[in-house]
Amino acid sequence: MPDSYQLIETALQQPMDNGDVVCNLCLWRCRLRHGQRGFCQAHVNRGGTLYNLSYGIVSAIEVESIRNKPVYHFRPDSQVMSIGSFGCNFRCKGCHNLEISWGVEALDSLAKGESTEAWVNPEQMVATALKHGVDGIAFTYSEPAVWLEYVIDVSRLAREAGLFTVYVSNSFVTNEALEVMAPYIDVLCSDVKSMSDAFYKDVCPVSNVEQVLGSIKRAQELGIHVETRTNVIPGKNDDPQELKQIAEWIRDNLGADSPWHITKFFPAYQLSHIPPTPNAIIDTAAANAHEIGLRHVYGHTDISCDCATENAPVSDWLELDVDALNEVKKCAANCCGDEGILVKKFERAAGLVE
């Protein structure tokens, strides 16, 4: 594990004969030429090798109840330290973590060798969790597959320290990624956003319902405790019949005892014009789910998607030198030039390539 910021080779990559590389972390399976980044903006091809440029880069930290994820059937009285980075493989129009999840400015700064975002190595992250007396670490705020290399390294050390791990996901991830993470992840809290392909394609044009549901089912088969959640957006995915279909899928594929959390939408970003979900819609969906035999259904009128906008600054949680924490991050490995510029379009803008 590195002791300073540097690029880390992407865990699941497939080099091609022409120097392209296919990323197999999520179901985009981006094929990238030298100097290109994937859709998530956090993985870059440098000379035929794919690298994660966000390894150890932390966007947010919070200490809270595991019930806030929401997770109710795994250590329900425990506290977790929630952490996140930058970048995501979805573009949700109602995203509450836009600067983190899309992370355009932060990831561009990393790609230019100009970032001053906090870098925390895995040992420091686990030590921070222990210092704050939590029982586990939750990877959240954006899709954790984007920095899976760091997630695995932290999770391995967390296990050794007696901490459990929670992975909050959209589940647009590959089976290969699930198999890599399964030995180190205790809980998957996954979105089931809709039973409509059209809904999924609106947030990720290459996605469909079957892919997401297949990943969730595979996670459970691999021994990960699974709880699902649906954020109900008025006029988008609030049809009672569709919500009932989600409940039926959970019952038939994850089991009647599998927990389902129905959460309230609050206006944000491009969906700021849509009002909060009426409580009656959530109550009706929960009642219908109980009626078809799903035993553990929770209607939440105060919980939405994980939101980091009110979190304290990352530096407040860490016993690290603030100046060192926020110094400019340039890759310390030999995969980059002295300028630290990683993406071809930025190299071109700096006059380093034609």
Image (cartoon, rainbow, N blue to C red):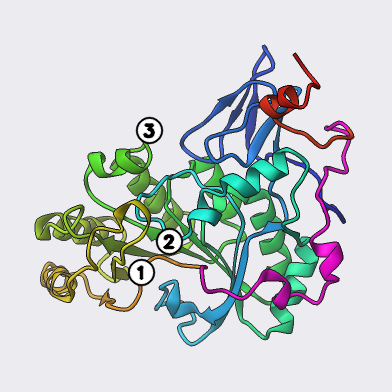
Earlier-in-chain disc, 2 versus 1:
2
In the rendered image, the vertical position of residue 323 relative to residue 303, given as above or below: above
Pair 3/2: label in front: 2
Quadrant location of the C terminus in the rendered image = top right
User: Amino acid type of disc 2?
Assistant: His
Residue at 20 percent of width and 54 percent of height: 237
Crowd tier of the residue under label 3, counting other residues whose Cα lies within 10 Å: few below 14, some 14–19, many 20 or above? few
Q: Is residue 76 left or right of residue 336?
A: left
Question: Can residue 347 be seen from the camera position used here?
Answer: yes
Measure the alpha-carbon separation of dots 2 and 1. 9 Å
**In the image, which residues are magenta?**
309-337
Front-lying residue, 38 or 157: 38
Circle 1 residue: 304
Q: Amino acid at mark 3?
A: Val
Counting residues from the start of the chain, the first of labels 3 and 2 encountered is 2
Nearest the eye: 1 or 236: 236
Give 285 or 205, whichever is nearer the viewer.
205
* Residue 208 versus residue 344 in the image, above or below: below
Q: Closer to the N terminus: mark 3 or mark 1?
A: 3
Mark 2 highlights which residue?
Answer: 96
Using the numbered discs, state the Cα–Cα distance from disc 3 to disc 1 in whole angstroms: 25 Å
Circle 2 packing at 10 Å, graded few (<14), some (14-19), many (20+), is: many
Looking at the image, is mark 3 or mark 1 nearer the viewer? 1
Q: Is residue 137 magenta?
A: no
Q: Amino acid at mark 1?
A: Ser
Q: Position of residue 129 (x, y in %)?
A: 69, 77
Residue at x-position 73% and y-position 68%: 125
- Badges 2 and 1: C-beta atoms under 8 Å apart? yes
Q: Are marks 3 and 2 in contact (CB under 8 Å)?
A: no
Residue 14 percent location from the top left of the image? 63, 27
Residue 161 appearing in the image: no
Residue ID for mark 3: 206
